[in-house]
Amino acid sequence: MKTCLIVIDVQESFRHRPFFTETELPAYLAAQNALIAGCAAQGVPIVRILHSDGPETAANPFSLVSGHVRPLLGLANFDAAARFTKHRHSALVGTGLDVWLISQGIQRLIISGIRTEQCCETTTRHASDLGFTVDYVLDATMTWDMTQPDGTPLAAADIKVRTATVLQGRFCTLCTVDEALARARQAA
């Protein structure tokens, strides 16, 4: 079963959002970069997904004209097998990624990137519904604290636990970096 690593929205745009903190960034980048290095060493294709939306003004960090829709500083450089810019939460909506994956004979996706509960989770659910086998590498995803509708805080760690809970066994297999790399080796 041919595998592909998807690196979702690991971009400078987030540094320009008011919620951005670097608290979890070193651990996230270590896991993400280890996953990239391991996939590259195995010859697993790596796809870069960037997100652009909102008004095309320099003040919007997710607009192309802002200059921030580019890889996050600290992310390992890699030769992308393909690159897509998305405008929705799922990397599979309107990008052509699904067509590319099918044309490459890819059946298993390794999901990583930013944000855990948004674009990574949404892409995972969508990919599963399309029939792909999905390995979700929770440690190679990142998010930030949020505020619940009642105003109470929701810690990033709790968001990751919730995401793992709702995805595991229904939409994906939760994996560590090492487990995802081992599963890719076995599938080859």
Image: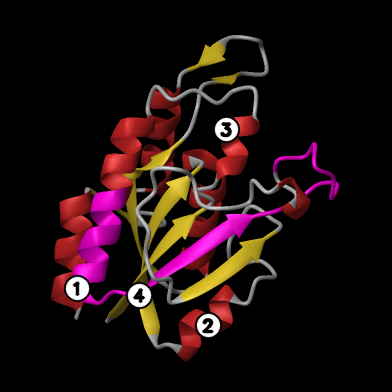
Residue 65 picture location, percent across and down: 77, 52
Give the Cα distance between marks 3 and 2.
30 Å
What colour scheme governs how the chains and residues are painted in the rendered image of this protein?
Answer: secondary structure
Depth check, front residue: 65 or 23: 65
Ranked by sequence position, the earlier of labels 4 and 3 is 3
Proximity of marks 4 and 1: CB atoms separated by less than 8 Å: no
Tell whether 75 sits left or right of 144.
Answer: left
Ranked by sequence position, the earlier of labels 2 and 4 is 4
Element at label 3: helix
Element at label 1: helix
Q: Which residues are magenta?
A: 33-61
Give the Cα distance between marks 4 and 3.
27 Å
Depth check, front residue: 170 or 12: 12
Give the Cα distance between marks 3 and 1.
31 Å
Q: Quadrant of the N terminus?
A: bottom left
Q: Which residue is mark 4?
A: 45
Depth check, front residue: 177 or 58: 58
Tell whether 104 sits left or right of 13.
Answer: left
The residue sitting at 64% across, 22% down in the picture is 18
Q: Quadrant of the C terminus?
A: bottom left
Q: Amino acid at mark 4?
A: Pro
Give the Cα distance between marks 2 and 4.
12 Å
Closest to the camera, between mark 3 and mark 1, is: 3
* Magenta span contains residue 52: yes
Q: Which residue is mark 3?
A: 15
Ranked by sequence position, the earlier of labels 3 and 1 is 3
Q: Which residue is mark 1?
A: 42
Element at label 2: helix
* Magenta span contains residue 35: yes
What is the crowding at mark 2: few (fewer than 14 residues within 10 Å), some, or many (at least 20)? few
Location of residue 52 with respect to 44 vertically, above or below = above
